[in-house]
Amino acid sequence: MAAPARPRPLPYPRPKEPAAVEPEATASAGTDRRRFLSYLIAAPTLVVAARLGAQAIHPEPAGAAVPSLPEPSDLFDLGDLQNLAASPTSGLISVVVNTDGTASFAMPRAEVGQGITTAIAMLIAEEIDLPLEKVDVTLADARPELVWNQLTGGSNTIRSLYTPVRIAAAGARSRLISTAAKQWKVPPSTLTAKDGVITSKSGKTVTYGAIAAAAAASKSSTVSVNLKPTKDFTVIGKSTNRVDALAAVTGAKVYTMDLVVPNALPTMVCRPPTINGTVKSVANLAAVKAMPGITDVAIVSTGVAVRGNTFGQCIDAVDALVVTWGPGTEDHQSDETVLAELKKAEIPLAVPPLNLLAKSIESEFTFYFRSNSPLETNCAIADVRKDSAEIWSSMKSPVVAQETIAQDLKLPVKAVTCHVMQGGGSFGRHLFFDAAREAAEISQKMGKPVKLMWHRTDDFRHGRTHPMATSRIRVNYSGKNVLTYEQRHTSVSTDFTHGFGEILTEFAAELPLGNLTFAETIFELTQNVPYNFGVTTQLLNEVDLGFHTGSMRNIYSPDVCTATELMVDQLAAAMKVDPYVFRKQFLKDARSKAVLDKAAQVGGWGKTMPAGTAQGIALHNEYKGCSAALVEIDCRPETVNRPIENGVTGPRVTKVVYVVDVGLPINPKGLEAQMLGGIMDGIAQVLTSSLHFKNGIPLEGSWDNYYYTRQWNVPLDVQVVIMPPTTGKPGGAGEFGVASSMAAIACAYARATGTMPTSFPINHNEPLGFTPLPLEPPLPEEPTNGLG
Amino acid sequence: MPTQTFIVNGKKVSVDVEDDVRLLWVLRDLLGIHGPKYGCGLNVCKACTSHLNGAEFNPCSVPVGDIKATDEITTIEGLPATVGKELHPMQEAWLDIDVAQCGYCQPGQIMAAVALVKTVKAEGRSITDDDLDGIRNICRCGTYPRIREAIKAGAANM
Ligand code: FES
Ligand code: FES
């Protein structure tokens, strides 16, 4: 059903300034000199903690006096909201100095490839003065007292942990030094610490390991610490290889399915032919249970679960089940019907063409469903006993998972332990804990531990998808001025029930936005138009159709930004101004102009290109950062029609220059990696990758159907330029590479072909490039052609 | 139940399991060799890529009964031993260039890269962009540009 349209008065009220929440800072002589409070914790070895949420909310003042009022996200964005939410949860995070000379930290976040374990280890190494390899960052189990502050999302990990982690590490360093000073009976100021060794003026030395136990506190107390001034950083800002790289390249890195939990045998689920279908009856439960290797079969809420000695035998058992299925919830929905519902729900554009001198341009764009499935499919291990449960899975919202699973199992929350495992990618998928919840149900039903894995085909068909959306834009311009910019984004609703929801409920009153839905709030906190386009409004409306949705990397931004930037190119053309020059003229702030200029300069904007090829340039600001992409695309027939077996070729992006300013880069090499990944996503989303919904289920069931970027789509020339520190505060990175690269590719395609694309990916409405795998039995037969 | 015998990473193994179970499950679920990953089970994603008698293959799509007692299977865990070193030059290149993100695809990527370089060398030529375009392995994290760079660097040291 379409939610009623709720246009709001324009322009937005100016956000009220949220109270600063940096309670631990005392005195001050510039940011670098502030003193912070750390907590010495009574323990057998040295443990120093800091309060999570010690990072201040600093709403940036609005830029110059400009015709466009700042939009909400210019001043207060999603990350600020998460930081604000963190402050009252008094959970402490602590750095432990071990007697072997290492420091360890159990990070209340999920590593899914984005490199945060490495970046956090760098922060600790910097402040405590240890070599990076002596810092061990692990993933913390669910800690319910942290409430919403154990959510990994919104590219917010570094923004939220940057200060607290450094406080704890600095506190540990100062305690180690004061302990040595006491033992040697010298003033602490005469000692130096480097690489885990404390040295006195007279040349006496002691290692952190040797003094860790002596430095341990017998009773807890507070210690005030100074943080290193930025100019003294030797680790932060230096390109550093990932701490888990060796494990990754030797096959030793342990993901959920590699963990050995006694008696947790392979388990799979036979799923319905349409989403949310239910089991009416099973004709052959006993016969399937007697199949080779199979130990258990049980009907569960999502289908029929089988457990056996190998996943191969589970696949055979799943396909042997004779199930009568009830209808699903979306059986009458296909791409066309969803699109029609979206069109019905669009909030009308409010500003008519203004006067006789003003002209108006209007465009509408469609963005089809996309799968956020990582390479590792949904999976979890569960061991549910009579009065306790233990779960292992890659979970970005483990606290919500723990509470939900406890409720499902009818156990007290503290009887459920949720271990956060290293994830094989996420892209938004692991904000939810579908596999953990399902594994817990199955384990309880079977009365045995289970190792649950989704089949690839199920992961595309029954897994979560980025919702389909339309974006409609109207601009009014007169001469060389843009007078109004209106954007109406209409989307199948995005499920935000993984924890953002709780944050928003709790802090609704603190928000500068008034009474919006969760999704509208997130939209307002993340979206902005970086240009002076007069009266600017961007509104979201959602249609709740019951699909399994979840935001994909960068939530609304890639689609919204692509629509915006295509409109910018149209405006530039209408005013007969070069797209780069036009952007430069209309951009609001200096940082945006700097990344744009850099991209144009490094990428050689404006060079002559052969017919059928072109450059495109685009911009996106988010996470307190700015990004610009300049790309080249080749749409000539000889490129588009390159033969690739079971794959799509299509136009090839041949070059990308991506410039990013994140305020303060912690690990440039890791940041570059995230941008590379975002660029590959941008290519996929413009050119090749989408789900085709047909009668309640996606047709895609394999990577040869769902066309994510493959090597034959990869540009041969990709350059990521990282701007030197600008704000001195780290912004977000994990999702930041997608939006402007997607937009620049769309703009380049329009310029190369002379036709502006209006639906994405551009090949979505072409005849299907594959034969869909059957819906029943649910799993394709395992091939026998693996010998090449 | 038949006994399956073959050589994995230089060690002879025997395991009791039906002939039609695909080798990936025998390696992962019964022998506890977890380097080869599951990404599709359809011979598409190539996350399980390993070597059979030195040639690239995909154990998710080979029934264990097709494997002979004398067959030598090498997974990522056994790759360094094939050159008698702690790490294969391709792994070294991967580390230098810091290719991995989540890492899930990387054992398969490295095994595919080594096989590709061997093939190309046997043809008496060096790696081209067309060769790299032909690699089918999925990396959903999008590490493709660094993979290309690493293969060229690794090939130089093989
Ligand atoms: S798991 Fe073997 S090719 Fe995908
Ligand atoms: S590194 Fe994550 S899939 Fe390749």
Image (tube, coloured by chain):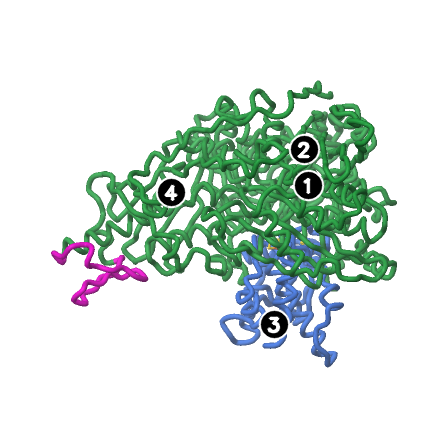
Chain colours: A green, B blue
Q: Residue at x 38, y 52 (%)?
A: A124
| Residue A196 within the segment the image draws in magenta | yes
Q: Is residue B139 above or below residue A39?
A: below
The quarter in which the C terminus of chain A is drawn is bottom right
Viewer-closest of A57 and A258:
A57
Q: Nearer the viewer, mark 3 or mark 4?
A: 4
Q: Chain of mark 3?
A: B
Q: Which element type, helix, strand or loop, lies under badge 2?
A: loop
C-alpha gap between disc 3 and disc 2 = 52 Å
- Label 1: how many residues lie within 10 Å, few (<14), some (14-19) or many (20+)? many
> Which residue does the numbered mark 3 point to in the structure image?
B153
Q: Are marks 2 and 1 on the same chain?
A: yes
Decide if residue A310 is in sight here: no
Q: Chain of mark 2?
A: A
Q: Residue at x 16, y 66 (%)?
A: A202
Q: Which element type, helix, strand or loop, lies under badge 3?
A: helix
Q: Nearer the viewer, mark 2 or mark 1?
A: 2
C-alpha gap between disc 2 and disc 1 = 18 Å
- Label 4: how many residues lie within 10 Å, few (<14), some (14-19) or many (20+)? many
Task: Answer with mark 4 or mark 1, whichever residue precedes in sequence.
Answer: 4
Task: Answer with mark 2 or mark 1, whichever residue precedes in sequence.
Answer: 2
> Which residue does the numbered mark 1 point to in the structure image?
A561
Q: Please give left or right for residue A539 compared with residue A365 in the image.
A: left
Please state which amino acid type lies under the numbered disc 2: Gly
Q: Quadrant of residue A515?
A: top right
Please state which amino acid type lies under the numbered disc 3: Ala
The magenta stretch spans which residues?
Answer: A184-209
Q: Residue at x 30, y 58 (%)?
A: A101
